[in-house]
Amino acid sequence: MSERPGDLTHPPALEKRAERPHPLSPLIRGWVVLLVILIAIARDLVPDLQRNQFDLIDLILANVLLVILGVLGVVLLTALASFLTWWFTRYVIDDEELRIETGLFTKTSKRIPFRRIQSIDVMQPLAARIFGLAELRIDAGSDKTALRYLSRRKAYRIRDYLLSRAHGEQLSVADSDARTQADAFRDLSADDQVLVTIPPQRLLLGFLTSTDFLVSAALSLVAVVVFFRLGLGVFSFGALIPIVLGTLRMIGSRLLTQFNYTLARTGRGLRIARGLTNLTSQSVPVDRIQGVRITQHLLWKPLGLYRVDIDVLGIAGGETSQVSSILLPVGNTRDLAIALAAVLPGVDLARVPLWRSPGRARWLHPIALPTYRFGHDALVAVARRGLIDTVTSVVPHGKVQSVRIGQGPLQRLARVASVHLDTTPGPVTFVAADIDPGDARAFALSQLGRSERARAAVGPLGAVPAPVRRPGR
C-alpha cells in the first residue's frame, strides 16, 4: 500500500545558527589571565627589603634566557587557552530561546527560559572598554551565566531584549532592535528617566569627610609621629605600608568604581551605571531587594549627605565587587528620597513611629543608648542606632525570613533583650537592640503576623495597613 502525502513525517526543523563571542575575546581574556599570572610571579620574586636576601635585578640578568622562555611559555599557553575557550563557546538568542554552549571535551548546552531571568549586568573592564567590548552577566536565580565578550552595542541590545522578555513582553529580536538604543558610554537612551546623578566633587567630598577615611588618616599621622619621636623615622615608612594600601583600596572602591554614578529608571526596571576605568551597568531587581541600610557619617550630618546599601537576593556584592550592593554612594536629602521611593514605594520613614530602649540599659551603652530606636508601620520595620555614624536599617515585612530574640549575660543583668530580623546575607543587619523583654516578645510575635500578611498580599509592599501598637513600659 502506498503512503499518502499526509502520512509522511514532518521534516526536521532547520538547525539554528549559533554565534560565537566577539573575535577579539581571546585577546581580552588572555591579557587579563596573563596580568594575573605576572602579578603572582612578581609577588614571589619581590625581595625582602628589610633582610636584603637577594637583588631582583641581578637575579633577572643572571637568568635572562630562562625569564624570556618563561614569559613566552606563559603567553603561548594563555593565548591557546583563551582561543579554545572562545572557539568552543557559542550562543543562540532569538525569539524562542536563550541557549549557551560551552566545553572542549565535555559539551555543555544551557538553555535559560526567559521568565527565569532576574537581572542582567553589563561589565566593561578597562581592556575590553578600549576595544569597545563588554561582558554580559545573566542572573537566573541559582544559575549565573556570563558571555565574554560582545561588542558594546550588541551587549546593550541583548540585555534590553532579554529583560523585556523576562518582564513578560512578547516582542521579537527585530522589534527590540528597532527601539531606542542606549548611549555607548553612559548606557542611557532617550526613553530612560535619570533619577539620580552623583557629581565627582560630591563623591570626593563624601570620601574625604567619611569616618573610614578620617580614621585611616589619623592612624597614619599617629604612626609617623610616634616613630619619629622614638627616633625610628626610617622604619615608619614600613609601618605605613598596610595603612597606605588600605587607603588606596578605599580610594578605588569609593571613587574610581563609583565615578560618574547614575541611577535611572528604564522600561525594564532600575539600572545603575558607574565606573571610571571599568564601566559597570547593573540591573537592580526591585522585587528581590530584601532590606535597605542608610548610613550617615559624623561629618556628613551637617552636610546632609547619606549612603544607601541594599540586600539583594542572590547578590552578595561589596564595595570592590563588580556587582555592588551600593544603591547610593553619597547623596543629599533629595537623592535619598528619590532612591528610597524607587526601591521602597509607598514607604515614608519620617512617619514610622520609633521607640527607645529603656534607661536601665544605659550602663551597657553609656553614650550611644539615646540613639537606639526601633519601630514599624504597616509596610516596613525600622531600627536605628549610632552616635558617630548613624545607621538606619529598613526591612519590608514580606522579606523577613526569620525572627530571633537574643539575650546575653549582660543583657540578662540589665533585664533587656534584642530582636533580630533575618533576611538574605548582605550589608543590612536589623537588630532592635536592648529593649524590654516583654516588648521584645510582643515585637517578635507581631512581626511574624505582619510578615505573613505581607507575603499574602499582592506585591512586595502590598500589606493592608494595620494599627501600630506602642510597646508598654
Image: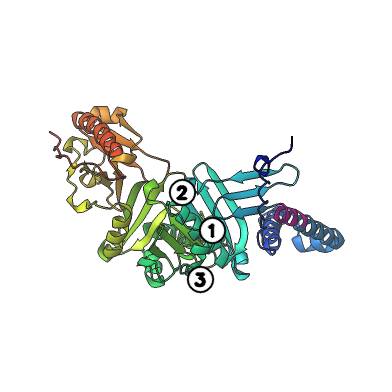
Q: Quadrant of residue 62?
A: bottom right
Span shown in magenta? 80-88
Looking at the image, how many numbered discs can be counted on the residues?
3
Q: CA distance from mark 3 to mark 2?
A: 24 Å
| Residue 222 inside the magenta-drawn segment | no
Residue 465's place in the image compared with 170, above or below, is above
Label 1 near label 3: C-beta < 8 Å? no
Sequence order check, earlier mark of 3 and 1: 3
The secondary structure type at the circle numbered 3 is loop
Label 2 near label 3: C-beta < 8 Å? no
Q: Give the residue type at disc 3.
A: Phe
- The residue to which callout 3 is attached is 185
- The residue to which callout 1 is attached is 245
Examine the residues drawn in magenta and state their main secondary structure.
Answer: helix
Residue 353 is labelled as: none
The secondary structure type at the circle numbered 1 is helix
